[in-house]
């Protein structure tokens, strides 16, 4: 089971599906990186679902098409990862993730920022 703390967001990811773009919140829990869609339902109740997660470093490499034995990058023209913002003070794998993204994509925006964790 994947778990995270909603108070420990480490960044955001922007996904493009055709003409539509949307933002997912990123969390570091018991996985390498967790992509969560957070929204309000028709009754304005807070809702969420896990859109994607990388279980560990090897799984991230597989999903990004960086493994010799893995398939291609799961982010294709139907679900393109176009931007990632990472708070390096909160995310323990910042440098590993950035290296993977640079290898996996010819075109992507990567923003690194530093904010102290919420207290």
Image (cartoon, rainbow, N blue to C red):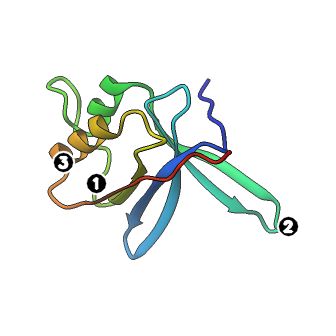
Where 44 sits versus 54, above or below?
A: below
For residue 76, which numbered disc appears in the image?
1
Q: Residue at x 21, y 40 (%)?
A: 99
Q: Which residue is mark 3?
A: 102
Point out the frontmost of discs 3 and 2. Answer: 3
First along the sequence among labels 1 and 2: 2
Q: With 36 as the anchor, is 87 left or right in this view?
A: left
Quick check: 71 left or right of 106?
A: right
Instruction: State the residue at coordinates (56%, 31%).
Output: 29
Q: Nearer the viewer, mark 1 or mark 2?
A: 2
Q: Residue furthest bottom?
A: 19
Dot placed on the residue nearer the N-terminal end, 1 or 3: 1
Crowding at dot 3, Cα within 10 Å, few <14 / some 14-19 / many 20+, comes out as few
Position of 107 relative to 64 (above/below): below
Foreground: 92 or 25? 92
Looking at this view, is 112 or 68 the one in front?
A: 112
Q: Is residue 64 left or right of residue 113?
A: left
């Amino acid at each position: 089971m994947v778990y995270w703390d909603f108070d420990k967001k480490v960044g955001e990811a922007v996904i493009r599906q055709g003409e539509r773009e949307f933002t997912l919140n990123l969390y570091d829990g018991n996985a390498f990186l967790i992509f969560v869609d957070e929204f309000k339902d028709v009754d304005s109740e807070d809702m969420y679902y896990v859109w994607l997660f990388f279980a560990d470093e090897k799984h991230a490499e597989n999903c990004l098409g960086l493994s010799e034995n893995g398939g291609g990058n799961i982010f294709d023209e139907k679900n393109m990862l176009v931007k990632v913002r990472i708070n390096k003070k909160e995310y323990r794998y910042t440098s590993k993730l950035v290296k993977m993204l640079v290898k996996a994509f010819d075109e992507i925006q990567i923003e690194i920022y530093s904010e102290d964790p919420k207290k």
